[in-house]
Image (cartoon, rainbow, N blue to C red):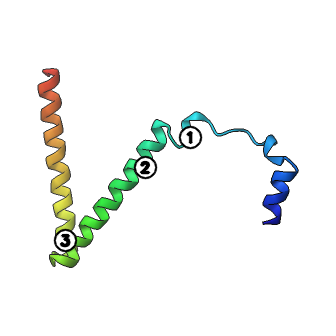
Amino acid sequence: KAAFINFISDEEWKSIEPVSSWFGPSSFLMSSMSALFKLSMWIRHGHGYLTENLGIPVWGSYAVFGLATLFLGMVLGLVSDVLWGL
């Protein structure tokens, strides 16, 4: 606590360079990182639900998420193919 008070009262904060806009809390990079963390938490909760509540073995949960990833990739590929006419 004393170190923080000295940091403020001695104006040591003036010598610190501001954070780059790339790493600011509202930047695209940090928003994307936040979305990835939220997705990982959703996957973790989904895995817990599948294994604990439904009784699916761990390898079965991995298979479900693996198949969902493949299916989502195919759907996104089809959508991009239709939109850009490739």
Report which residue position mark 3 lands on. Answer: 50
Which quadrant of the figure has residue 80?
top left
Q: How many marks?
A: 3
Task: Name the residue type under label 3.
Answer: Leu
Closest to the camera, between mark 3 and mark 2, is 2
Residue 76 image position (x, y, % from top left): 18, 38
Which quadrant of the figure has residue 20?
top right
Q: Residue at x 79, y 46 (%)?
A: 13
The answer to which of marks 3 and 2 sits earlier in the sequence is: 2
Q: Residue at x 16, y 62 (%)?
A: 64
Q: Residue at x 86, y 52 (%)?
A: 9
- Furthest-right residue in this view: 10
Mark sitting on residue 24: 1
Q: Tag 1's secondary structure?
A: loop
The answer to which of marks 1 and 2 sits earlier in the sequence is: 1
Asked if residue 32 lies left or right of residue 68, the reply is right
Mark sitting on residue 34: 2
Q: Residue at x 15, y 76 (%)?
A: 54
Query: In which quadrant of the rendered image does the N terminus lie?
Result: bottom right
